[in-house]
Amino acid sequence: MYSRPINPTSLVGPQTSDKDFALLHRLCVRSCPIYHTHRLQQPSSALALEMPVNAQPEPPSNTSRSSSQDTGGIPPTTSLQDSGFQALLQDSRFRSIVDRLGSAPSEPERFQPEYLPSEKVENADPPVGYVVDQRSLSRISIPPKPDGATLAEYPDGWSECLVTNEIKDKIFSIPGFPAPLVHPPKAHRIGPAPGKGLGIFATRDLDMSDLIYVERPLLVLPSYVNHVKIGCPLDWTVEQIKRALMFEWGKECHRAFERLEPEAQRAYLSLANIHTEDGSGTVLGICRTNGFGIEGLADIVGTYEAPYTGICKEFSRANHSCTPNITRYFDHKAFAFCFAATRPIKSGEEITTPYCVPWDVRSSRQQDLQKYMFNCDCPACGPDFEMFDQTRLDIAASAEDLIANFIAWVDDKTFPEDKLIKTSRWWIKVIESERLESSDFYRQHLVAIYRAYIALGDKENAAKYGILLGKWYQAIGQLEPPIELYSDPRNFQRQRNWAVRKV
C-alpha cells in the first residue's frame, strides 16, 4: 500500500482509539522495511536509570516463568551419601537413580518438570521393588504458631511448609520476619467465569500499582522432586522410575497437607486439579495445577536452583490471560504473596494472571500452556495471531538501542529535542494497546522518556513520567525508593544528565 517508511507518530491524533491505534501500528510495520523478525526475548536491562542517590533498584528480569504454575518436576540427581543406602545399592539387583540416568557429579542430569506424566496413564499405581532413602525435609509452620492455634485466633493465617533446614534458617533470619500482613481495602470477589469455572473479579476500580490482595499460601512445597532418592531394579524403565518418584513425592506432600487446619484442608481440596489421571495423587496434583513460584526461595542442587512453590486459597483461582492485568511478588518478611494491578482495572472486570510469558510469540505461549490442558482463545492466540506475534517482536526490538540513541541525541544538538520522547511515547501506546504493561519493555520506554525530560531540564514532565515509573516498580514489588523520589525536582537536579540537552 505504501512505498516508503511511515513515521507512525505523524498519523496519531488525540482521538485515536486503542483499537485503531493497534491497527495503525500494524499497517506501519508492514510498510516499513527497517522492521525485521527475530527471536523474541526479554532484553536485559542495559538502560540504567538515573535514580535517587543510594537507591538504584534492580529491574526485574521478566523472563522468569514462575507464573507457569505446573511445578512438579525432578531436579538434578545427586550422589547418595548414606552408607546404609549405598551398601544396599551394592546388591546387583539394585541401582540408584544416579546410575540409571548416567549423571556425573560435575554436571548432573535431571528430568525437566514437563517430563513428569501429565497424560492419562493406564496404571498409576507405583511399581514395586524399590527402596527409599531417608528424606531431608522439615515440616514446619511459617510464621511459627503455638500448638493448638486456630485461624480465629490468627486470622492472617500461616503456611504449612516442607523445606530444608537451610531454607528454614534463611527465612527465620530475614530482618523484620515475621511482619504482619497489609490489608488493602476489599477489591475482589470469586465468582463464575464463563467457560473457565471460577475466577476472580474486581469489586471496585483499580489503578496501576494498586495493591489488590495479600495472601499467605496454604502450602509451600519444593517444586522439584529433589529430596526423594530411590534405588531400583536394574531392568526398570525411566517411566517406572518417574512413577515411583512421583508416588513418594506425593506422600511427602500429603504429610504437609495433613498439618493444615480442617478449614484450610477443605479450601485446598476445592481448588482445580487437572492431574487426576496421571498418578500425581490429589495433593500433588492440586500443587502442580495451582502453585505459584516463590521468587528468592530455592535450594541449590548440584548446579541448578530448585525453587519452592506456594498454593493460595484465593488467588490460585486467578485464570490465565496472555494480556494479564495483575502481577504478583512475594513479601519474604510477611511470608505472603502480594497481587497488584499493572494497569487500570474496572469494577466487574476479571482479574487475570499469565500461566506463560505473555510477551512471547504464540507458539511459545501455547507450548507453555499445554501442561494446563487448555487452548487459549484470546485475540493474540486467535486467527490473526501472526499480527500480534509481529507486534511483540517489534516491541522487543524497539528497546534494543535506547541507550545508544540517548547518547547520540545528547551529543548531537541537531536532533530535534522531542525526537526520543515521541518515539518512546509511540511504543508505550503500542504496548498499552497490546495490554502488555507488565513487560520490562514498558519500563524501558518510561525510563527513556523520564531521562530525556531530565536531560532537557523539564521538571514538570520529568515528574509526570517519574510517577508512572515509580508506579510500575511498585506494581512489581520494587518498593524502594518510594514513588515520591521519582518525582522530586531536587532529585532531578542531582542527576548527572540534568539539563545537558537544554538549549
Image (cartoon, rainbow, N blue to C red):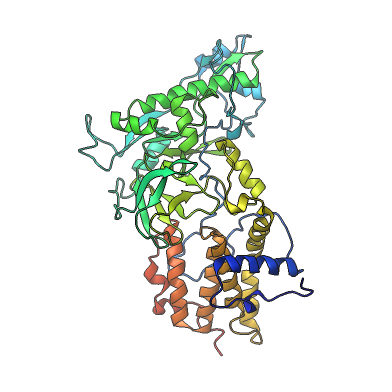
* Quadrant the N terminus occupies: bottom right
Residue 340 in the figure: left or right of residue 126: left
Query: Residue at the spot x=45%, y=32% of the render?
Result: 286
Query: Residue at the spot x=24%, y=36% of the render?
Result: 151
Judge whether 207 appears above or below 494 on screen. above
Judge whether 315 appears above or below 97 on screen. below
Name the spot of residue 391 as percent of width and height, x first.
65, 60
Q: Nearer the viewer, residue 196 or 363?
A: 196
Which residue ends up furthest to the right in the rendered image?
A: 3
Q: Nearer the viewer, residue 387 or 169?
A: 387
Residue 88 in the figure: left or right of residue 218: right
Asked whether residue 376 is in view, the answer is yes
Name the spot of residue 297 as percent of width and height, x first.
45, 42
Name the spot of residue 340 as percent of width and height, x first.
41, 55
Residue 129 in the figure: left or right of residue 391: left
Residue 162: which quarter of the image? top left
Q: Nearer the viewer, residue 425 or 444?
A: 425
Asked whether residue 494 is in view, the answer is no
Name the spot of residue 301 as percent of width and height, x first.
54, 35
Judge whether 238 appears above or below 176 on screen. above
